[in-house]
Image (spheres, rainbow, N blue to C red):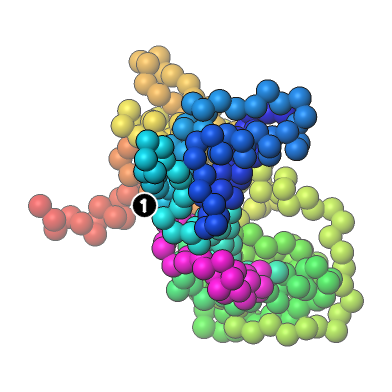
Amino acid sequence: MSTNKNATIRYQALDKCFRNPGEQYYIEDLIDACNEALLDVAPNSTGVKRRQIYDDIKFMQDSKGFDAPIESIKDGRKAFYRYIDLSFSINSQQLKESLLTLSRFKGMPQFEWVEEMKARLEQTFHLKTEDNILSFEENPYLTGREHIGDIYSAIVNQRVLKITYKPFKTNKELTFEIHPYHLKQFNNRWFLFGLNSEYQNLTNLALDRIQEIVNSKLKYIQNSNIDFTEYFEDVIGVSVNDSLKPEKVVLKINEELLPYIVSKPIHGSQKLKKDDAGEALIELQLQLNYELESLLFSFGEKIEVLKPEVLRTLIANRIKKMNKKYLTCE
């Protein structure tokens, strides 16, 4: 049995003692309680020593442990231990952290039960999960998230959807009958990938441009040839062009930016190299698309595209256009 498992058993035994209002647990009692718990699951256990229990109490009190409100109460020359708040439990603390994580999935398909469960658990275990200690990257004001549940259900139950869609570049609404296959999130936006019934090709629709979704009467065509795990391997983002082959992209990286790029790679194909002058270069192997162009542009002067020439030109042209807008600035 591993040390980690032994520690978990001890913490649980101590937790039970600290929140028992009818008993006073001195250090010897805590040692006995831990040894009894360990022997139940590991008869060959050699038991725990006094020093170990003191270390466990210190860990449980620490914010890196359970932040447990343990107090030591003097009783003559001895002291017993208990929680200041007898409603506290390390299990409730762990449950609270789990609820905080789950609550971030509000509105997502298959997570409709989270809010109800959260309320029930808070009432039963006196949990308070209002503290915002965990944040995910998201845009709470983005439209289209309300469609996720319907689309997810259609994918699982293999239903064709009739979607009214309004692209960015036109005010005209379009109608698609889509055999939905995959939902993907990128840059805080959600995208649906599915077979377009009219053109028999894979279509990518942004959920925030969807105006209406209704069920279609068409028979669902299953996805039999696209592995979406591999589908996005050669791109950044969601724009995949089946007719394009991945290209080698070479970037010169500013020394200040290099640690960030190393710790958060631009793409899975990223390789770090050096040029003849000893300056850092990054090599990537991927398709050229708008998302890659925009990502590189976001690094500003701290990154330079060396290859391919077509991508270098695209970035240069955007810089020229921006420069014209700011020529009046001193």
Three-letter code for the amino acid on which mark 1 is drawn = Arg
Q: In this rendering, would 122 be left or right of 111?
A: left
Q: Is residue 307 visible?
A: no
The residue identified by callout 1 is 318
Q: Nearer the viewer, residue 151 or 64?
A: 64
What's the magenta region? Answer: 111-137
Q: Quadrant of residue 194?
A: bottom right
Please determine whether, in this image, residue 120 is positioned above or below residue 53: below
Residue 36 coordinates in the image, percent (x, y): 68, 37
Q: Residue at x 66, y 48 (%)?
A: 232
Q: Residue at x 64, y 84 (%)?
A: 212
Question: Is residue 148 in the magenta section?
Answer: no
Q: Quadrant of residue 103?
A: bottom right
Name the residue at the front extreme: 76
Q: In this rendering, would 15 be left or right of 183?
A: left
Question: Is residue 121 in the magenta section?
Answer: yes
Q: Nearer the viewer, residue 242 or 125?
A: 125
